Image (cartoon, rainbow, N blue to C red):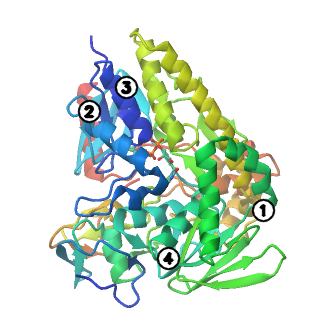
Amino acid sequence: MTTPAEGGQLRRLGEWDRPSIRISIDGADCDALEGDVLLSALLLAGRRVRDSEFGDGPRAGFCWMGACQDCWVWLSDGRRVRACTTPVEPKMAVLTRAGETVVG
Amino acid sequence: MVERVVIVGAGPAGVRAAQTLAAAGLRPTLLDEAPATGGQIYRRQPAPFRRPYKTLYGFDAAKARQVHTAFDGLDGAVDHRARTLVWSLEGQRLCLMHEGGTENLSFDRLILATGAMDRVIPLPGWTLPGVYTLGGAQVALKHQACAIGERTCFVGSSPLLPYVAYQYARAGAGVAGIIDTTPRADKLRALPDLLAAAGTGAKGLYYMGWLASRGLRYRHAGIPIRIEGESHVTGVVVRMAGGRERHIACDAVAIGYGLKCEHQLADLAGCDFRFDSSNRQWVVAQDGVGRTSVAGIYVAGDGAVIRGADAAELAGERAALTVLEDIGRPVDRARVQKIDRRIAGIDRFRRGLETAFAYPHHLARDMADHVILCRCEAVTAGEVRHAVTQLGAHDINRAKAFCRVGMGRCQGRVCGPAAAEVIAGALQRPIEAAGRLRGQAPIKPVPISALADAAADLTVAA
Ligand SMILES: Cc1cc2nc3c(=O)[nH]c(=O)nc-3n(C[C@H](O)[C@H](O)[C@H](O)COP(=O)(O)OP(=O)(O)OC[C@H]3O[C@@H](n4cnc5c(N)ncnc54)[C@H](O)[C@@H]3O)c2cc1C
Ligand code: FES
């Protein structure tokens, strides 16, 4: 079970009783729960999801519904995924910096 | 020949449309990028979650269950494809992406029930971690059982404002403040229209009353000035009704100013649009029962007109009945009349909501030059004004070409409405003069490899 790390953005309010899933975020192990999306996992562990390409600072998503596109991260296999609509899977290795191109 | 009817969006509108077509013996295809049906309001929680309907949907629990069981009962009568994004439309063909792979799907008739998203007005600090839309704050709670912060300040002017604040407080989350930009007098003015829709209007009053009874003050006529913080939100500064500025300490902000239609596919299809001056947005032109200007393309639900979930269910059914009429199938006239009457009733309620939660568009028009207006491309309001006054951009599409506003990954979904206000302000013209930001495929990002595959398919098929 994950306890929200000090400094995590989100607060879990319930639904603790789910199988835990180990993923990694920028190389550090992180225990999420089955049914979590990556955005939740990232924001329970910290307060940043990515950096703006324009140097105006960290971003952490905005709409939670796949519309704003401000939550894209990389997986270690090179895929880019939208954190708010991607469920965590065992051994997912999330990278919040650098990767390949997505058009749109 | 059996008509191939495809529905995009499995919210209340799309589900009722699918049900109606299935009942007539057609086997419609229902596409949604979400993993399950339900749409925004009746979004289902992921499998391992256990909260009961009452906890998730409150007063709407019974309706949520009805929409879910209506769909679940269709079993096989509908070709439902979940996790399937429709990212383009070319003629009578849709481009789909499912699990990273692409596929084209042709249709004879298409019902677009693509829903809505929050409308926002940028302010200093709104790109900081910890700032989310009101709808987003609700998704975090409903879909993930999480609050967006330890103490959240709710800001804006939207039916979702009292509702999401109430849902948070009820779920045990910290509420740092609730600031509604609309003056109280407007709420009172709207009361007759709101209460005309018996249950629905009373719910809003209940939420405000409940919050007050817990000592959570619902403040009217407060204007958010800026969100503060270095690497994440630490507070928000609000100008209160009396003119005094107040700092509210919080680590999260939920913000929204009503909803805006998601209508990118109708745009790609070449449907005509019209400007709806009552809530200052472009909407797909339609005949009131779902037909757009393009033969065979229909719209329903909040993607067509922002009227809420009850109207979305009715409009979904109505659009399906229109499709049946158009292909020469018999329809139940009495049912058609009943739906039309009920939608007209909801229209009165909607006018009430637009008064009670007025859109303070002047906040967008007057935003300071240094504010990041377009968060995808980090374009400031000042750069957009410069494109208008110095470079001669006379509408939003020109401004986009000159300074990249609305050109980023979200295609102006987030900044579009506020950008139009800034441009109209700089032009010193009415908002319609700023024009409508045009979309392009892919309407949401897809990998380059998928684009190449789809293009090859289209070429082979052509
Ligand atoms: C985040 C959010 C929360 C809301 N919460 C409430 C609430 O609690 N109470 C309330 O009364 N109203 C709420 N609303 C308002 C809501 O718009 C309506 O109540 C109702 O959900 C509208 O129904 P609909 O069927 O028209 O659209 P929606 O319910 O929005 O359904 C549209 C569906 O279309 C899908 N879709 C859209 N485009 C595509 C595409 N290109 N490819 C594939 N799928 C696509 C979406 O994934 C979505 O599931 C909320 C709105 C938002 C945005
Ligand atoms: S948070 Fe907006 S797309 Fe993920």
- As drawn, the residue found furthest toward the bottom would be A6
Residue under label 2? B74
Q: Amino acid at mark 2?
A: Leu
Residue situated in front as seen by the camera: B296 or A21:
A21
Question: Label 4, label 3: how many angstroms apart (C-alpha)?
Answer: 42 Å
- Of the two numbered discs 3 and 2 on the same chain, state the one appearing first in sequence: 3
Q: Within 10 angstroms of label 4, few (less than 14), some, or many (20 or more) residues?
A: many
Element under disc 1? helix
Q: Amino acid at mark 3?
A: Thr
Element under disc 4? loop
Res. B184 mark: 1
Where's residue B332, x and y in %? 45, 14
Indicate whether A97 appears above or below B284.
below
Where's residue A48, x and y in %? 41, 79
Question: Label 4, label 1: how many angstroms apart (C-alpha)?
Answer: 28 Å
Mark 4 or mark 3, whichever is nearer to me: 3
Q: Quadrant of the N terminus of chain A?
A: bottom left
Q: Chain of mark 3?
A: B
- Of the two numbered discs 4 and 1 on the same chain, state the one appearing first in sequence: 4
Are discs 4 and 3 located on one and the same chain?
Answer: yes
Residue under label 3? B20
Are discs 1 and 3 located on one and the same chain?
Answer: yes
The residue depicted at 59 percent of the width and 54 percent of the height is B203
Mark 2 or mark 4, whichever is nearer to me: 2
Q: Chain of mark 2?
A: B
Residue under label 4? B130
The residue depicted at 72 percent of the width and 57 percent of the height is B422
Q: Within 10 angstroms of label 1, few (less than 14), some, or many (20 or more) residues?
A: some
